[in-house]
């Protein structure tokens, strides 16, 4: 009598095979969030709108960037050197990069159109790029794998729905729309534990991420008094109150200090 031997296939392999099949059929998928009765026209009168500009800086001795060890996946090793941690990235004169600056309060019950553009959160060199990004509720964000290795995109929000999707091949995409405001939504990769990103989800368009010079510009605000918040992944948050009149520009400056 012939005996049949059944071998259990690891769940990880099943997940990869399923993702490969999806890629062969076109790859990528879209998760949609319903935003009922979203307006198509901005409620702000452009003739009276103003701006809030400023800069985010770091005071004190700059922390030495920690090296990111990627030896566990040879496809991740950067040519010509090691990658460094992106928790605190500084430019000239203490400019703080990757701070998320946004209007926290002051817009009342104004409702805004959903932007038609699609920001891209790329996985390149086994790092999320950009490290910090912002979108509106209901706006599409595309998560792309540009690496010749397996990534799994794992968003771990507290107010929105968690999702976890595998991308084993370069060029695979996943499009997502968040359903509610949340600052911030952490992203990670369960395959490469050093990979992190943060997505700010707002119900209005007044947000910015600081670049190498630490500057930000919140354009097209209606006249009013606003609470402006600057968020940073390790240094915390700071807020300031700024009042702007019609066609006026206000300023805000944020200075973060090392955590004690």
Image (cartoon, rainbow, N blue to C red):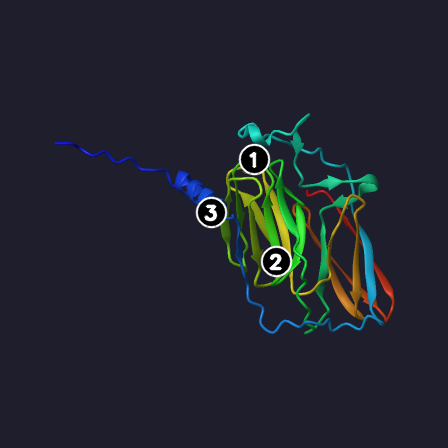
Residue 148's disc is 1
| Image height of 257 relative to 247, above or below | above
| Image height of 38 relative to 258, above or below | below
Q: In this view, does 211 lie to the left or right of 174?
A: right
Residue drawn 20% across the image and 34% down it: 4
Which residue lies under the disc numbered 2? 140
Secondary structure of the residue carrying numbered label 1: loop
Find the distance from the CA under tag 3 to the CA under tag 1. Answer: 17 Å
Q: Residue 208 lies in what quarter of the image? A: bottom right
Question: Residue 103 placed where, x, y %?
Answer: 72, 62
Question: Residue 190 placed where, x, y %?
Answer: 51, 41
Which residue lies under the disc numbered 3? 22
Q: Residues within 10 Å of mark 1 (few under 14, many from 20)?
A: some
Residue drawn 76% across the image and 40% down it: 90
Find the distance from the CA under tag 1 to the CA under tag 2. Answer: 25 Å
The reply to whether residue 183 is visible in this rendering is no
Find the distance from the CA under tag 2 to the CA under tag 3. Answer: 20 Å
**Relative depth, front residue between 88 and 150:** 150
Q: Which of marks 1 and 2 is nearer the N terminus?
A: 2
Q: Mark 3 and mark 2 in contact (Cβ < 8 Å)?
A: no
Q: Residue 102 lies in what quarter of the image? A: bottom right
């Amino acid at each position: 009598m012939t005996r049949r031997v059944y071998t259990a296939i690891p769940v990880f392999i099943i997940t990869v095979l399923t993702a490969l099949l999806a890629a062969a059929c076109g790859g990528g998928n879209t998760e949609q969030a319903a935003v009922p009765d979203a307006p198509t026209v901005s409620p702000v009168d452009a003739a009276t709108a103003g701006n809030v500009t400023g800069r985010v800086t770091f005071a004190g001795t700059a922390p030495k960037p920690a090296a990111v060890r990627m030896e566990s996946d040879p496809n991740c090793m950067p040519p010509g050197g090691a990658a460094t941690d992106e928790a605190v990235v500084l430019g000239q004169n203490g400019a703080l990069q990757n701070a998320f600056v946004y209007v926290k309060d002051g817009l009342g019950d104004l409702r805004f159109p959903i932007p038609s553009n699609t920001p891209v959160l790329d996985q390149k060199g086994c790092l999320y790029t950009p490290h910090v990004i912002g979108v509106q509720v209901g706006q599409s964000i595309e998560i792309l794998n540009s690496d010749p290795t397996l990534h799994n995109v794992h968003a771990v929000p507290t107010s929105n729905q968690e999702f976890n999707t595998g991308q084993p091949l370069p060029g695979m995409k996943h499009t997502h729309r968040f359903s509610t405001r949340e600052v911030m939504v952490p992203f990670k990769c369960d395959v490469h534990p050093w990979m992190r990103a943060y997505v700010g989800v707002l119900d209005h368009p007044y947000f910015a991420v600081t670049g190498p010079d630490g500057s930000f510009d919140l354009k097209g605000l209606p006249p009013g008094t606003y609470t402006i918040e600057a968020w940073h992944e390790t240094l915390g948050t700071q807020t300031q109150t700024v009042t702007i009149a019609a066609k006026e520009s206000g300023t805000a400056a944020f200075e973060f200090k090392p955590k004690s």
